[in-house]
Image (tube, helix red, strand yellow):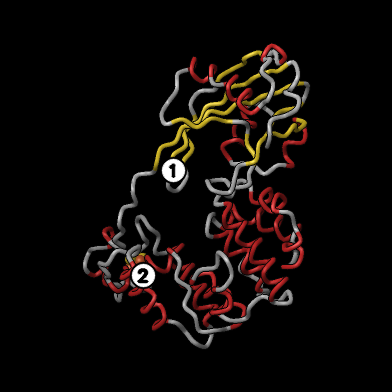
Amino acid sequence: MRQTYDPYRTWVGEIILQQTRMDQGLPYYRAFLESFPDVSTLALAREDEVLRLWQGLGYYSRARNMHASAKYISEQLGGVMPADYQGLLELKGVGPYTAAAIASWCYKQPCAAVDGNVSRLITRLFGIGEAINSPAGVRQVQALANELLDPVDPGMHNQAMIEFGALQCVPVSPRCMDCPLAELCEANKQGRVDSIPVKIKNKKPVERWFYYYSIRSGGECILIRRGKADIWAGLYEFPMIETRGPQTDEEIVHQLLPLILQKHDSKDDSALPLSIGALSAPVRHQLSHQTINARFLQVEAEHLPDPLPENWQRVPLDQLDRYAMPRLIHRYLESENI
Ligand code: SF4
């Protein structure tokens, strides 16, 4: 992934590496570039297609931002990626690290790229006690990274720093015994390796309760598309109800009919014979700032509501892989062998 000087490919690779390790990200990188080999093909793609290729990586906003930026490059910049740090920073979803990585690697610009690996390495080397996720800590680390940068080959320097942090100066039990920087490293000399870097603890994740209704009929099921204002924007899932706390099995079943009728004009619920199937055990799904507690109720309908409630889509079960879904839904489908 880091073997190309093409700015588009470097951009795609860096965004993927922000959320996964190299070995896990490589198949995604290859599949993404096979479908969208350049900025213009990405710009012309449907959002659905982009999200589907991102499925499993999480942080779907990053894929949406890349898509939006590709459109911006195509429509406003004549299809040519910005060739400098400031121009790259204008792209949606491109922050100082990604802009510096692309600018230094593809254009040899003297920009120090500071990711988590570099930040950890620098704080240990200089014995910095400031939290690395505080504004002051970020400024201090960036200033030191700028000072250390090799202006002759900044791209190679950045990659070396990143790799050194990732392989030698790892988060837990760094390899200080055989480290070539051991005698220079303040954290090592002061016996503070285990307490540096300092981090401000994030707030406790918010708990949410999602109850999904996997409504099927004659080889089809119902999907809905999530709105823009919440997690998993634009992804597909089953009709669901979110509650403020855990529900009993009985409550989960009782919520089903109102869910259908509330969105379905017909008052004749006898027209929609349903048979209630298995209710899954609770599943905890961890996101960066939220914990989703989910359960899935399987429902067989003799026929599906007609007309379908707004935003509901009838989808053949054998075509579900065409729809981008949150990993939580994907895992449920896998468990059901669908
Ligand atoms: S001596 Fe240890 S803490 Fe210091 S840079 Fe090397 S591996 Fe990291």
Q: Where residue 138 is drawn, which disc sits there?
A: 2
| Residue at x-position 44% and y-position 82% | 149
Type of amino acid under label 1:
Gln
Say whether residue 132 is left or right of residue 239: left
Type of amino acid under label 2:
Val
User: Helix, strand or loop at disc 2?
Assistant: helix
Q: CA distance from mark 2 to mark 1?
A: 25 Å
Percent x, y of residue 24: 59, 52
Q: For the residue carrying disc 2, how many other residues have a C-alpha within 10 Å: few (<14), some (14-19), or many (20+)?
A: some
Percent x, y of residue 42: 72, 62
Mark 2 CB lies closer than 8 A to ligand 1: no
Which of 169/293 is in front?
Answer: 293
Percent x, y of residue 162: 47, 68
The relative height of residue 222 versus residue 59 in the rendered view (above or below) is above
Say whether residue 313 is left or right of residue 18: right
Mark 1 CB lies closer than 8 A to ligand 1: no
The picture quadrant where one finds residue 208 is: top left
Which of 61/57 is in front?
Answer: 61
Mark 1, residue position: 290
Percent x, y of residue 22: 57, 58
The relative height of residue 254 versus residue 263 in the rendered view (above or below) is above
Say whether residue 302 is left or right of residue 26: right
Q: Confirm whether residue 273 shows in the render.
A: yes
Q: Point out the frontmost of discs 2 and 1.
A: 1
The relative height of residue 7 versus residue 253 in the rendered view (above or below) is below
- Can you tell me which quadrant of the image ligand 1 is in? bottom left
| Residue at x-position 64% and y-position 31% | 333
Q: For the residue carrying disc 1, how many other residues have a C-alpha within 10 Å: few (<14), some (14-19), or many (20+)?
A: some
The picture quadrant where one finds residue 9 is: bottom right
Quadrant housing the N terminus: bottom right
